[in-house]
Image (cartoon, rainbow, N blue to C red):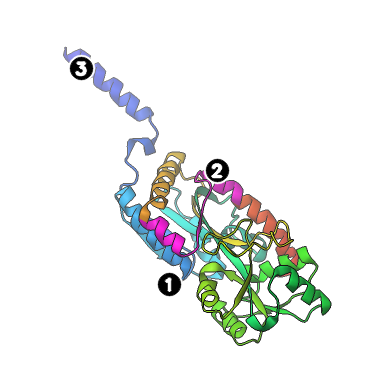
Amino acid sequence: MLKRSLLALAAGAALLAALPVQAQATFPDKPLTFVVPFPPGGPTDAMARILATELTKELGQSVIVDNKAGAGGNIGADAVARATPDGYTIMFGTSGPLAINQSLYKGQKYDARTSFEPVIYVGYLPNILVVRPGLGVSSVQELIAKEKAKPGTLSYASSGNGASSHLAGVLFNEMTGTQLLHVPYKGTGPALNDLLGGQVDMTFTDILTAMPYIEGGKVKPLGVATAKRSSALPDIPTIAEQGVKGYDVSVFFGVVAPKGTPADRIQVLNQAFARALDSDRVRSSFAKQGLEASPDHTPAYLGQFIRTEVDKWAKVVQQAGVRLD
């Protein structure tokens, strides 16, 4: 009897030893760090904190938001790329650090396509083209006609060289044959102030930022810059609907982990995020901010989306002739 018991114990120990280390331990069994590569207080930070609260409930461990800002998101992204790939460090990334910056910054230390394991695509915030009310146009085609009548005389504001609001105008010029004049500012606030003051004619900005000004009649919306209409502004046609076929500019949000993070831990994180995103609190909060939900929550979808976006913006950055240190 004793011999049989000892043999059974030995067999059990051998089976346990054969299992991967990560399968032997419960994941997670300690707090997680959720890196936001931008300063506190912005829309990306706000969304990350809403997700972190819900994720804490789902995982049974604290999810701590860590703001690592700088270089358009590159500092935080590089820190995550170099972090231990154990699932305890993840990042809430956006179009900048996960796509545009790949071509925009010289000496990029990480590669958005190969330095991370995709966890989940959260959704996107549509951009919208808004103009000053006195410009005298009511549609994208009227704007194009007005610009072509006197090329180079209409201006658009951006939050800075290389920002999505800048590249949106570059893409628009390329696809329509217009010559809108780019006027860069140090941030979205100053750009909007000069638009409201009539110093510039238009801007491409996100719907969350534009909504109060649209509702107050201070700017006129001409077209949503994504492939489909915004659920927050369903009566505003897309730019693509108005003859600029294929025009699609938005700020996307996705969660990634360092390359080499075990697949089973990616799966745990993916499922926890999917449940969090489906909660009433998160869906309601994000809808109020104009966020469009992801059509697919699989890690593979985000991975392919990042690769497509990197290629798309590489062409636009080259066309713009902009490179940042």
Query: What residue is pinned by disc 2?
Result: 300
Q: Nearer the viewer, mark 3 or mark 2?
A: 2
> In terms of sequence position, does the residue under pointer 1 or pointer 3 come before the other?
3
Label 2 vs 1, first from the N-terminus: 1
**In this view, the mark in front (1 or 3):** 1
- Judging by the rendered image, the residue that carries numbered circle 3 is 5
Say if residue 323 shows up in the picture.
no
Helix, strand or loop for disc 2: helix
Q: Quadrant of the N terminus?
A: top left
Amino acid at the residue labelled 1? Gly
Residue depicted at 34% across the width and 25% down the height: 15
Seen from the viewer's position, the closer of residues 139 and 203 is: 139
Amino acid type of the residue that numbered disc 3 sits on in the rendered structure: Ser
| SS at circle 3 | helix
Q: Position of residue 45 (x, y in %)?
A: 44, 66
Q: Quadrant of the C terminus?
A: bottom right
Label 1, residues with CA under 10 Å away: few <14, some 14-19, many ≥20: few
Q: Earlier in the sequence, mark 3 or mark 2?
A: 3
Measure the C-alpha gap from mark 1 to mark 3: 61 Å
Q: Report the magenta residues as a range.
A: 281-305
**Which residue is at a point 56% across and 68% down the rendered structure image?**
206
Residue labelled with disc 1: 41
